[in-house]
Amino acid sequence: MTRSTWLRLAPYLFTLGFFALWEIACRALSISNFVLPPPSAVWGALVQYQKPLYTNAFHTLWMTSLGFALSIVFGLALGLLVGSSKLIYAGLSPLLVGFNSIPKVAVVPILVIWFGVGWLPPVLTAFVISFFPIVVNVATGLATIEPETEDVLKALGASRLDIMTKVGIPRSLPYLFGALKVSITLAYVGSVIGEQNASNLGLGNLITRASADFNVPLIFAALLVLAVLGVFLVAIVDVVESRMTGWAKRSQLSNA
Amino acid sequence: MTAFVELHDVTHVYGGGDGPPAVEGLSLKVKDGEFVAIVGPSGCGKSTLMKLATGLQRAKSGTVIVDGREVVEPIKITGMAFQNPVMLPWRTTLQNLLLPLEIVQPHRSRLRAHKAEYVARAEMLLETVGLKGMGSKFPWQLSGGMQQRASLCRSLIHEPKLLMLDEPFGALDAFTREELWCVIRDLHAQRGVTVILVTHDLREAVFLADRVFCMSARPGRIIAEREIGFARPRDLDITYTPEFAAIVHELRGHIREARAVA
Ligand SMILES: Nc1ncnc2c1ncn2[C@@H]1O[C@H](COP(=O)(O)OP(=O)(O)OP(=O)(O)O)[C@@H](O)[C@H]1O
Ligand SMILES: [Mg+2]
């Protein structure tokens, strides 16, 4: 086989290998199902509980996507604002860092007090946990525009808005997508935390209920579904990224 | 004839503080339609002069007047080409050329409706610099020299009255450079634009310019001015005549003095 086919197969082989190792370890060390169920038991739970897993996974996907969409919109807007002005950058950065240092689990009870139990707390938790990387990256993309590039436009009498739309936004797109890949997984963490504490639906809620029943294989099955959803969404971001910012990778290649 | 570009006793300090000035007591007049070259030691403030004349930098003291008006903000009648080509990598070469049209009026409001006309103009410009059919390539798919030519086209597309060229050929090989000298020479002859060219290459300055200014080491000022009397249109062959060599030699002397003082 050629190197490129190996490269294409590598993700699948490594994943299979991981599960095989896990299965072998569980059997060889005869680990109890209550501690660490082997993949075969997790698969069994997946099949047995496919209906609740399916509906709850769909709900979680919704919560995550909503929160993620919110953080793209707000993150982008705030990032552009912060990146375009030194004054705002200086003023807002301690606030932003301070805000980001708060553990988001601690915010969930407040959200419950404000909005009650339901779909809002998971969405908002997903949002608050995932928008920070977007703000930072977009602001960095804007703040690092080469002065020469700005000069080209300024010498033509371009307004600040022109410079933003012609250079700032396209240039910060690769930074945005870099952030999106981090953010989307964070958004999952957020929505699951929200569901665990403040919702009657979703994988987070399913996990809480399963752990009350000591149904460890079901917990693992739910975690597995989360992982697959995460891989899936990152793959979507990847595809969109290569469509929109292919120039960034290729131009680096050509410089190399 | 009155001056088209005039700098009068200009002093500029970067950062606006009390640091050492980049240029000090800089005065210079360029006539309408004239081709002027500026030479001087590295770091003497040539690029600074360009930025002052186009309003990209505001002088600490002194006045800058272009086309009868004092320059207080970036002026819109210039085309600029810099030492590095600064193309936007996410746009094709053609889209890069169209960039000034998306900003400068009246093209800005006409662009959408008259796209085909402008694209044709851009493609013609590309052809004059020997980049025919390269419009659909991305800048990073072009060689350094090709990018430089494209950047030259971009500075011309909106038909500016003033063309500022900051070492546009610095990174090119000798043959390409001479070819582009001829391109610039012809553009200047056809359109009657006023050109200010910063260069390190004295032969380039003497071949292209009506007048050559020498600058002192930092803080930069004009220390010598030389009329170049060769008749236009000039042929590349004049660069091998003894008269040409004598002028280049004389200018070299000025630069050497400027460097020795520093
Ligand atoms: N953005 C800046 N901030 C601070 N100092 C600067 C800046 N740009 C230039 N300078 C200083 O001003 C002086 C003049 O710079 P300038 O770029 O005008 O030189 P130059 O004549 O164009 O040089 P070269 O021929 O090498 O391009 C230099 O000594 C440089 O250190
Ligand atoms: Mg320079």
Image (cartoon, grey):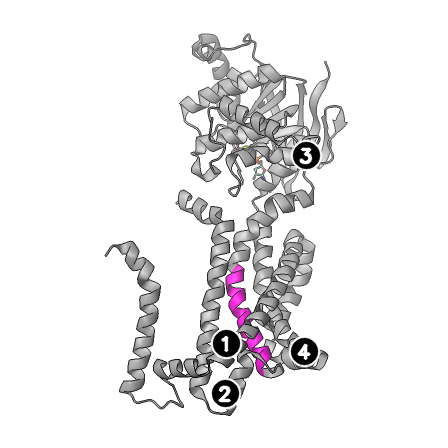
Separation of marks 2 and 4 at Cα, in angstroms: 24 Å
* Quadrant that contains the C terminus of chain A: top left
Residue holding disc 1 = A54
Separation of marks 1 and 3 at Cα, in angstroms: 53 Å
Q: Quadrant of residue A191?
A: bottom right
The reply to whether label 2 and label 3 mark residues of one chain is no
Q: Residue shown at 64%/47% (left/top)?
A: A164
- Is there CB contact under 8 Å for labels 2 and 3? no
Q: Nearer the viewer, mark 2 or mark 3?
A: 2
Q: Chain of mark 2?
A: A
Separation of marks 2 and 3 at Cα, in angstroms: 63 Å
Residue holding disc 3 = B108
**N-term mark: 1 or 4:** 1
Q: Is residue A2 above or below residue A166?
A: below
Residue holding disc 4 = A111
| Residue A161, horizontal then vertical, whole percent | 68, 45
Q: How many marks?
A: 4
Q: Residue shown at 50%/32% (left/top)?
A: B135
Considering the numbered disc 1 on the image, is that residue within a helix, a strand or a loop?
helix
Which one is nearer the viewer's eye here, A117 or B248? A117
Which mark is on residue A210? 2
Q: Is residue B42 above or below residue A35?
A: above
Which mark is on residue B142? none
Q: Which kind of residue does numbered mark 2 sit on? A: Ala
Considering the numbered disc 2 on the image, is that residue within a helix, a strand or a loop?
helix
In the displayed structure image, the side of residue A240 where residue A128 appears, left or right: right
The reply to whether label 1 and label 2 mark residues of one chain is yes
